[in-house]
Image: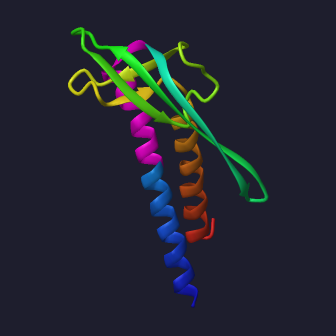
Amino acid sequence: MRYVGKVLVGLVMLCCAAGAYSWGWDFFALRFTGVHTTAQVVDGTRSRMVGVQSGTSYHSTRTVSYVTADGRVMTHTFDSEFSETQVGDAVEVFYNPANPAEVIPDTWTHLYFASLMSIGALAALGMLFGL
């Protein structure tokens, strides 16, 4: 039974490490190689979900439009990013010049989640080896 616990903790560690890598990659890759530009919010929705964990939860999407370096107008819909913005507001994004449809917001959300995943991976590693 002792080994089952270690295997489960090991799986948690691997999942957290994979999540940290994924979120961290999203945060840094386009910041170093991408193009920074200003986008305009062109559409947004906000839905209210009642009864989620004995309370109310909100989900929002924002569609932004941005112009690439070669003059193409692109749009992208973000889930739960820029939730406090209104249609017509300007926001900052990074896009991949080789694939302009690949875009990330210029916010710290991805780094925050990468940090949480890293802490989870380190905690699982410490539990695994009894540190």
Q: In which quarter of the image is residue 125?
A: bottom right
Of residues 30 and 69, which is closer to you in this image?
A: 69
Left or right: residue 95 versus residue 5 is: left
Q: Which of 18 and 67 is in front in this view?
A: 67
Total numbered labels placed on residues in the image? 0
Residue 4 is situated, as x and y percent measured from the top left of the image, at 52, 84
- Percent of width and height locating residue 40: 46, 14
Percent across and percent down for residue 23 are: 45, 42
The picture places residue 103, in percent across and down from the top left corner, at 36, 28
* Range of residues picked out in magenta: 20-38
In the visual, does 103 lie left or right of 118?
Answer: left
Question: Where 130 falls versus 52 (above or below)?
Answer: below
Q: Residue most toward the right?
A: 54
Instruction: Identify whether 55 is placed above or below 60.
Output: below
Q: In which quarter of the image is the C terminus?
A: bottom right
User: What residue is at 20 percent from the left and 25 percent from the top?
Assistant: 98
Res. 27 image quadrant: top left
Q: Give the residue at x 37% y 15%.
A: 66
Image quarter for residue 25? Answer: top left
Q: Which colour scheme is used?
A: rainbow
Q: Is residue 18 or residue 94 the one in the foreground?
A: 94
Front residue of 66/126: it is 66
**Position of the N terminus by quadrant:** bottom right
Q: In this view, does 17 lie above or below 95?
A: below
Q: In this view, does 55 lie to the left or right of 42?
A: right
The residue positioned farthest toward the bottom in the image shown: 1
Instruction: Based on the picture, tell me whether residue 117 belongs to the magenta stretch.
Output: no
The residue positioned 40% from the left and 36% from the top of the image is 26
Kindly report the secondary structure that dominates the magenta region of the rendered protein: helix
The residue that appears at 58% across and 56% down in the rendered structure is 120
